[in-house]
Image (cartoon, grey):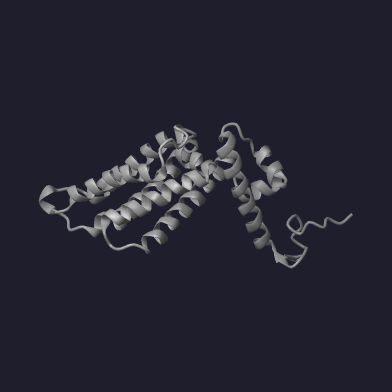
Amino acid sequence: MKNSDSDANPLVSKIYRGQSTEVRIGERRKRLVEVGIELYGAHGFRATSVKMVCLAAGLTERYFYQSFANGEALLCETCTAIMDSMRQRAAEAMEQVDDSVSERVWVAAHTYFSALVEHPAAGRIILFEMEGVSATVDAYYAQELAKSTQLFVEWFLSRVKQNEARNLEAYVLAQGILGALYQIAKEWVRSDFKLPVDVVTLHMQVVGVAICVAFSDQ
């Protein structure tokens, strides 16, 4: 009996139902990431098995392992998808305001906090689920945080004239801005968003602007 699954049989054409193997793999991978965000965000990574992800995605485990080595690999991919989306949203929002550091910090923070309210499952992943899983996930998470730190240098600290006499490193200060953002966000999420978005944004703006002023020669 012939196997009609073109992915399993290399002799079958790579084009199946109008889609190439690569396109179908890409679509399944995207679906797994979407379901991963939903389940890891709702139930936690440790409480969500690969089988649970596959059932929710309507895919077999064979297709899961075609895209990901294990659940940790999917968790890391969900983190990248979420953080890339948030960074892109912030960048686009900042294009709509003037070059003032105060305005840029406000817009970036407001966009971030708004996203946490709109997508709480995604927020849980990047704020809580990525921590303490394994050394591999810790290292991956550190790389994602480093991307955001470098963007904070470009978005904020590079916009002010540095006071070189103070011997302050822009990247280290950007780490401080990111650390404040994440700690404020974590406590805010734990409080079930007790403060309005504008209020929590204002607090983050105060921290971010203060750091930029300390870095500048003003």
Horizontal relation, residue 140 to residue 169: left or right? right
Lateral position of residue 163 relative to residue 4, left or right: left
**Extreme residue in the left direction:** 165
Residue 188, x across and y down, in percent: 41, 36
- Point out the image quarter for the C terminus: bottom left
Please state which of residues 118 and 155 is positioned toward the viewer in this rendering: 118
Q: Residue drawn 66% across and 47% down?
A: 64
Q: Residue at x 63, y 58 (%)?
A: 26
Q: Quadrant of residue 127?
A: top left
Q: Residue at x 12, y 48 (%)?
A: 166
Q: In percent of the image, x 76 and y 59: which residue is there?
A: 6
Say if residue 172 shows up in the picture: no
User: Which of these two is toward me, 210 or 195?
Assistant: 195
Residue 101's place in the image compared with 54, above or below, is below
153 or 10, which is in the foreground? 153
Quadrant where the image shows the N terminus: bottom right
* Left or right side of 100 for 81: right
**In terms of image quadrants, where is residue 96?**
bottom left
Give the x, y percent position of residue 17: 77, 65
